[in-house]
Image: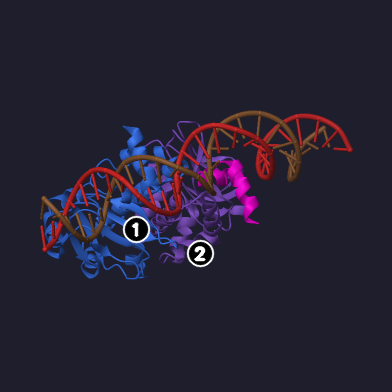
Chain colours: A purple, B blue, C red, D brown
DNA sequence: AACGCTTTTTGCCAAATGGCAAATGATTCT
DNA sequence: AGAATCATTTGCCATTTGGCAAAAAGCGTT
């Protein structure tokens, strides 16, 4: 829990009573490697916080290729926003790519927190906006570059991720085949 | 102004008095083709709403290539969020790519609106989250695909933009050279 | 150590895209 | 209309990347 509050307090203030209330709704959860946190075709009903491990959001193209939209590292919220907010079916999978420890809140509890704790909505919005901006900032530089540059930038953008997950996931994030990425890695060192 | 309120009311409620207050702070502004709304190296101090025209956000790579991060069409807010919120220098240019009509608010007025109008903060956050999600959704499918598919997807994603702006801007968004995009266009029809 | 399974690397060739420069087309200004 | 400027198209060739299949390496289990 400590990590969660350290994280939240960077975006606004919470007193002890408020934190206790949040704690009372929080559930710690182990998500083993490859397990899904939420799935395409279902409606997201949980908000999570990654305490330990890495999660990715991915989907499948019409050619059956697996495409990784982005990774979520330690100390970030994980929630399929569109599905969660609008209660529509998701088109993406949220999957653990290492063994993970999460703190999760049910939708009902989360909404209660939002309504009860003054300023919590603002904190959450700041967190979400920042995360979304970060996703845009991480994606945009990749489209224009060739595969090698994309990989180099990936290493800068996700330094804590590169060496903890299989090459195939990185390839599916960068839009490069595994083979090409393997060759690129070889050429770099 | 009508368009602005139609837009805002899709995200929450505002009574007449509140709308009048918003109107009192709004300034209509013409932004001719190619003019900048905000610039790299400066701090964004305005929030805009695109009434008519198309705006893009772009920056320059270390090789001097111009890279378009995204386009903003009619009936959307335009604001360099990171710079505006955190008061740090922006790294991007926000530029008109057609003649534009905007409604703008100064930072001071905007903050006054946020503090005074109950529920306005929530509306604004919803608008911004939606816009950011849209940017992510529009970008992700592009990385993985070949250039032709990217262009086809671009036409789906930005149907109202394709035929109103120069090919070079689209190329710089898709990460393709002008020449290649020109050939792609030829092959499609 | 040996086996099965998954991930990564490699080779070969084809296809896609970039770089550069010139040609063509469009637009604006005089 | 003609000149100047800018945007788009095209040709030619080099480079990058993909597709496919096989080999090698890594890992956990017995």
Residues packed near mark 1 inside 10 Å, few (<14), some (14 to 19) or many (20 plus): many
Q: Chain of mark 2?
A: A
Q: Please provide percent x and percent y for residue A71.
A: 51, 50
Q: Quadrant of residue B86?
A: bottom left
Q: What residue is pinned by disc 2?
A: A6
Q: Residue at x 55, y 52 (%)?
A: A148
Q: Quadrant of residue B36?
A: bottom left
| Viewer-closest of B56 and A71 | B56
Q: Residue at x 36, y 48 (%)?
A: B178
Determine the main secondary structure of the stretch shown in magenta.
helix
As helix, strand or loop, the secondary structure at mark 2 comes to helix
Q: Depth-wise, is mark 1 or mark 2 nearer the camera? A: 1
Query: Whole-Å distance between the Cαs marked 1 and 2?
Result: 34 Å
Q: Which residues are magenta?
A: A164-189
Residue B79 visible in the displayed image? no
Q: Please provide percent x and percent y for residue A125.
A: 37, 57
Q: What residue is pinned by disc 1?
A: B58
Q: Is residue A46 left or right of residue B105?
A: right
Q: Please tell me whether residue A182 belongs to the stretch shown in magenta.
A: yes
Q: Please provide percent x and percent y for residue B68.
A: 35, 54
User: Is B67 rendered above or below residue B113?
Assistant: above
As helix, strand or loop, the secondary structure at mark 1 comes to strand
């Amino acid at each position: 829990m400590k990590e969660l509050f350290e994280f939240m307090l960077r975006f606004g203030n919470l007193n002890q009573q408020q934190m206790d209330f949040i704690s009372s709704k929080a559930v710690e959860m182990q998500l083993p490697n490859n397990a899904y946190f939420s799935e395409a075709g279902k409606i997201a009903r949980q908000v999570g916080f990654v305490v330990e491990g890495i999660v990715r959001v991915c989907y499948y193209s019409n050619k059956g290729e697996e495409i990784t939209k982005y990774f979520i590292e330690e100390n970030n919220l994980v929630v399929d926003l569109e599905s969660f907010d609008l209660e529509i079916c998701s088109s993406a999978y949220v999957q653990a790519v290492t063994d993970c420890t999460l703190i999760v809140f049910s939708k009902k509890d989360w909404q209660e927190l939002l309504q009860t704790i003054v300023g919590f909505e603002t904190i959450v919005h700041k967190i979400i906006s920042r995360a979304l901006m970060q996703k845009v900032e991480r994606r945009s530089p990749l489209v224009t570059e060739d595969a090698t540059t994309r990989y180099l930038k990936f290493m800068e953008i996700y330094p804590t991720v590169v060496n903890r997950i299989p090459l195939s996931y990185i390839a599916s994030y960068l839009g490069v085949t595994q083979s090409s990425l393997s060759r690129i890695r070889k050429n770099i060192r």
